[in-house]
Image: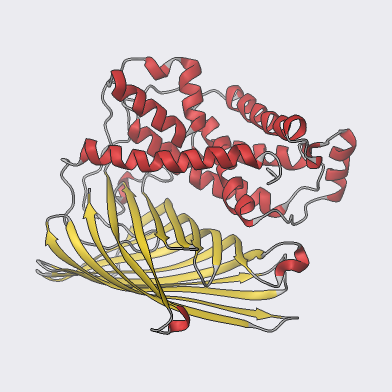
Amino acid sequence: MIKHHGGKMIYKILYTIRRSILLIMLLFFVLQFSNMNGQTSLQEDLPSGISQYPYYNSHDSLSNITASSKNYWLPATEIVSLNIIVWSYSKFLTKRSFADISWETVKNNFSTGFVWDNDRYITNQFMHPFHGSNYFNASRANGLNFWESSAYTFGGSLMWEMFMEKEAPSFNDLVNTTVSGITLGEISNRVSNLIIDESSVGLERVIRELSSTLINPMQGFNRLIKGDMWSRGLSNELPDFHFTFSTGIHNVFFNNRINNNKSYLTLRVNLDYGNQFNVSEHEKPFDYFTLHVEANIGKGNDIFGIIASGVVWDRNVKLFNSSRNIVGIYKEIDILTNDIYKFSATSLTGQLINTVKISPAIRMKNYLGLSAILMGATNSKYAVEADRDYNIGPGVSGKVGIVLELKNFGELNANYKRYWIHTLSGAESEEFVGLLNVGVNYQIREKCFWGLDYLLYERYGDYKYYPNTQDSNSAIRLYIKQII
């Protein structure tokens, strides 16, 4: 797909701008919606797929934004044009060899078939999904539904792999661009729609349209060429959504030793979109989704994580008379980097969620999930044989968690997620990654809490031709959390 020596640079710039504007957008939401009534029930951020605010009354999504009539030809034209623009940048400005294409290279791509490429981790795991999200949102901005836009995303990625590079097409690029791009695309589509308000005017309208465009460039482009950016309309009917912000100290104990530690500033943002338990209102994919982003900033290196999950299908099930239960399928992305591992996975997850009121003062929530990892990657010092610093392959993950909500106190929570990656490209191995989180939240005032977490990062690599690897770090996190 986009090579890190050429076309990647323009998308790295766009990615940086997009990440920066997200912070501005979050501040904007704080100012605009801080007076909205919110759920005061506690539930600390859990791995993806678990609602923090299960009892909202949901609204229809953003019906007052100017709707685009369905157009199949315009998104196809935009996707082809986007590929040509990126190729032209690499061919004529940065003069990269992979862009030296001809009918002969196209013929060779079809005869060679798909292989595993050796692009850098940031290119394959971040830039390809971002590029795929633009394919997806070119279609969404022209009235296509989720599934139609997914087909266009696959088509755009396939076009690039087969026609726009001299190098052989790549398995991992096609999966990451398409599957991860769909997830990021639908989330960015809905987040950008939260920002747009066609009843706003003046500077506020400019800020809204600019912020929305940087979150979702293809929607912004289509609103521009169709004149929707300056058209006057009604206020949005916003769906239920809530942000949670937390900050504090994250202290890591290397090799679980108290005398070998390092402190980080922790910054975390959660977005809950929709109501997980209003299953009857989940008519379309991602009518409910969660997004968790965290950065733990320290001298020399950072700990970073993104966990995103959107419902594809779910149903209420009856297990016990005193409980509410949901079984569902969720599309998920996990990206985790720390001193023990650098890991990413795009997966499809089956999940059972249960909530039961034990007493008037105690409510318990549980979940159990099993995921098919369509494409995963984890760093490996032995992967140099594939000219990379990471292994690639499919796998499986499982997660389990429990939350006890205590009236007039806060909550206790514990969750664990374990990943297994079977290496298909890299140093032949079975890679295992785990994350344990045990915590307590204490309510100090309405919507504001003190939090204390214990975390365990662990990794084990079972290698066929190299010595096995095993590492483990623990951490204590102390923070304050505010629900917006």
x, y percent for residue 196: 35, 28
| The quarter of the displayed image where residue 446 is located | bottom left
Q: What residue appears at the point 45 percent right and 56 percent down from the top-left corner?
A: 306
Side of 412 where 138 appears, left or right = right
Left or right of 118? Residue 147 is left
Question: Of residues 219 and 34, which is closer to you in this image?
Answer: 34
From this viewpoint, which residue is outermost toward the front?
299
- Quadrant assignment for the N terminus: top right
Task: Choose between 400 and 278: the one closer to the eye.
Answer: 400
The residue shown at (56%, 75%) is 432
Viewer-side residue, 244 vs 108: 244
Q: Quadrant of residue 466?
A: bottom right
Residue depicted at x 90% and y 37%: 104
User: Seen in the image, is 159 located left or right of residue 471?
Assistant: right
Kindly identify the residue that appears in the image at 41 percent across and 57 percent down.
295
Q: Nearer the viewer, residue 195 or 186?
A: 195
Q: Is residue 141 visible?
A: yes
- Residue 172 x/y as whole percent: 67, 54
Residue 147 appears in the figure: no
